[in-house]
Amino acid sequence: MYRRLVEHRIRVALEDTRVVMLCGPRQSGKTTLMQWIAGTDIPFFTLDDPITLEAASTDPIGFVRGLDRAIIDEIQRVPSLVLALKTAVDADPRPGRFLLTGSANLMTLPRVADSLAGRMEIIRLLPLAQAELRGTRPSFLERVFAGDAPTTAAPALGADLVELVLAGGYPEALTRSTWRRRRDWHLSYVEAILQRDVRDIARIEQLKAMPKLVRVLAEHSGQLVNYSGFGSALDMNHVTTRKYVGVLEDLFLIRTLQPWYSNALKRLLKSPKLHFLDSGLLAALRGLSPDRVSRETTLFGPLLESFVFGELLKLASWAEDRYVFSHFRDKDGNEVDVVMEDGHGSVVGIEVKSSATVSRRDFSGLERLQAACGDRFAQGLVLHDNDRTIPFGGRLAAAPLSTLWS
């Protein structure tokens, strides 16, 4: 078992919070982690079990009544259980009573969000980060927001970098020894999610169109969201497409990254950006193998950008501070792939390049962002395929991608 760096946050939350929910995509390791933390003293119930599902669905209050503490796995399958849990923890408000896992974002449902407000802490678990695979605890976020140069260790370069990006972070997929076996796992995984989990959280009239939509979105990962364009190939209007994209986001397959804005700049684009949350899944959907990427190098850039965004989200999930993520693009074509803002309002910009070399023009978007932020700008980095950090002056630098796990 890989040690998950978010474990500390869960243990701390259990000491003072009645309900702790660990949410994230299926097969990211939520159940394994919760059982590891709880040990054998807390009963475990999974709503993927048909008998347990029937009991919880038929009589949610009766199911919860009498439970002193419990792990309830895949809570999104019976949202009505949340109201029963509210009654139970209001009657007995001891901390750490219920540990929940969910493979969907239930907080988009108003009744669920309101019922456990102030009673539940939500912690997210994405597939394995490179730091977790290597057994390191990186200091990347702390250093860049302090204005310090990021550290560099265990660089992955060239073909090695391509291999780890295409592998992704799902624990089960990583047990497969070849790219083809990993690809088959990822494609079977998506098929199972779309056939089973979509029905748990939304009424979808065109369920058969979902696999095609996922593939369309995969071809546009790293690009600005265009709901009309996505839907036109499937004869969907933009309203339906937006709804279906929202469902995929609630299932933690994709993430729309909102645009950064400032009153100091008037010519900013206001469209969100689309990313898949696991680069291995994205590679499988796009049919990208290491051999194909070596022949068609331009295909690697969007995949690498989504990989970096996913790694940054993972780093933030166990950090002490809280971070807001966005992207920057103006109407002159200047852009920054990922903009991060901490709780104090400090801003860090990250630009991603798949090349081994960096030039001054690669910093144009970061320079525009820096000018808009002023003293709030902590640092701007171009992360690329190299093994050393090179300062470019004015709180700007080119740094290896391996700083994300160093």
Image: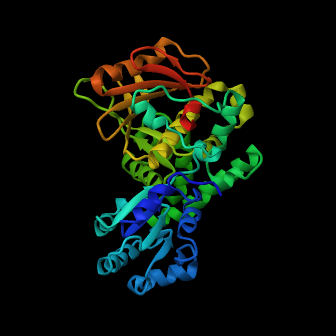
Figure check: 246 above or below 160: below
Residue 229 horizontal side relative to residue 263, left or right:
right
Let me know if residue 24 appears in the view. Answer: no
Let me know if residue 172 appears in the view. Answer: yes
Figure check: 24 above or below 153: below
> Viewer-proximal residue, 117 or 249?
117
Picture residue at 53% right of the left edge, 40% below the top: 138
Figure check: 118 above or below 49: above
Picture residue at 46% right of the left edge, 69% below the top: 99
State which quadrant residue 107 falls in: bottom left
Q: Residue furthest top?
A: 360
Picture residue at 51% right of the left edge, 42% below the top: 310
Residue 75 horizontal side relative to residue 26, left or right:
left
Q: Quadrant of the C terminus?
A: top right
Q: Quadrant of the N terminus?
A: bottom right
> Viewer-proximal residue, 136 or 260?
136
How many marks the image carries: the answer is 0
> Viewer-proximal residue, 284 or 232?
284
Q: Residue furthest left?
A: 263
> Viewer-proximal residue, 356 or 222?
356
Image position, residue 271 (x, y; %): 36, 35
Figure check: 209 above or below 329: below
Image position, residue 57 (x, y; %): 45, 80
Picture residue at 64% right of the left edge, 54% below the top: 171
Image position, residue 131 (x, y; %): 58, 43
Image position, residue 273 (x, y; %): 42, 37
